[in-house]
């Protein structure tokens, strides 16, 4: 069973600082303000189907997928969640993933 997890202001600011620069400015679906980022985070959290078992680890790896532009591949993001308060505390690009650009496109690769 999933329950609503609310993004904190800190998480919204970290998305703006860490993830937004990875989304091309040419993408028409690129969030333009904090309210839009908050809405996208709610959608991401709902899509991740985070339940009680996943919350025990406090960290959940998901892919944020900006849509509307072929040059915007899914971005691997680690979400840090406070299970007691049901809040998204912070987020960052997932470790061990690197982006490489070729011919005006970005590809994420997992490195060991």
Image: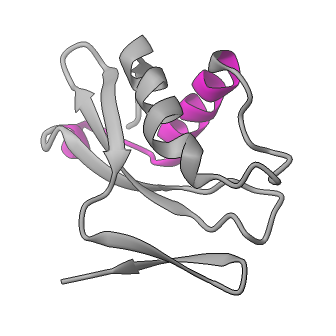
Instruction: Give the residue drawn at x 40%, y 25%.
Output: 11
Instruction: Give the residue drawn at x 26%, y 35%.
Output: 80
Instruction: Give the residue drawn at x 58%, y 23%.
Output: 38
Q: Residue 52's spot in the image, x, y percent?
A: 24, 37
Quarter that holds the C terminus:
bottom left
* Left or right side of 4 for 58: left
Q: Residue 45's spot in the image, x, y percent?
A: 48, 37
* Left or right side of 22 for 96: left
Quarter that holds the N terminus:
top left
Residue 24 found in image quarter = bottom right
**For residue 42, above or below residue 84:** below
User: Quick check: is 45 in the magenta stretch?
Assistant: yes
Q: Residue 60's spot in the image, x, y percent?
A: 28, 48
Foreground residue among 78 and 104: 104
Foreground residue among 47 and 61: 61
Q: Which residues are magenta?
A: 35-55
All told, the count of numbered labels is 0
User: Quick check: is 48 in the magenta stretch?
Assistant: yes
Instruction: Give the residue drawn at x 46%, y 48%.
Output: 48
Is residue 61 among the parts visible in the rendering?
yes
Foreground residue among 51 and 82: 82
The image's colouring method is: one colour
């Amino acid at each position: 069973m999933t329950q609503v997890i609310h993004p904190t202001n800190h998480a919204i600011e970290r998305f703006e600082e860490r993830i937004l620069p990875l989304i091309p400015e040419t993408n028409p679906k690129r969030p333009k303000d904090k309210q839009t980022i908050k809405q996208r985070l709610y959608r991401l959290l709902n899509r991740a189907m985070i339940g009680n078992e996943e919350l025990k680890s406090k960290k959940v790896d998901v892919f944020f997928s900006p849509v509307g532009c072929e040059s915007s591949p899914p971005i691997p993001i680690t979400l840090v969640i406070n299970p007691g308060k049901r809040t998204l505390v912070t987020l960052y690009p997932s470790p061990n993933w690197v982006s490489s650009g070729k011919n005006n496109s970005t590809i994420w690769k997992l490195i060991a």
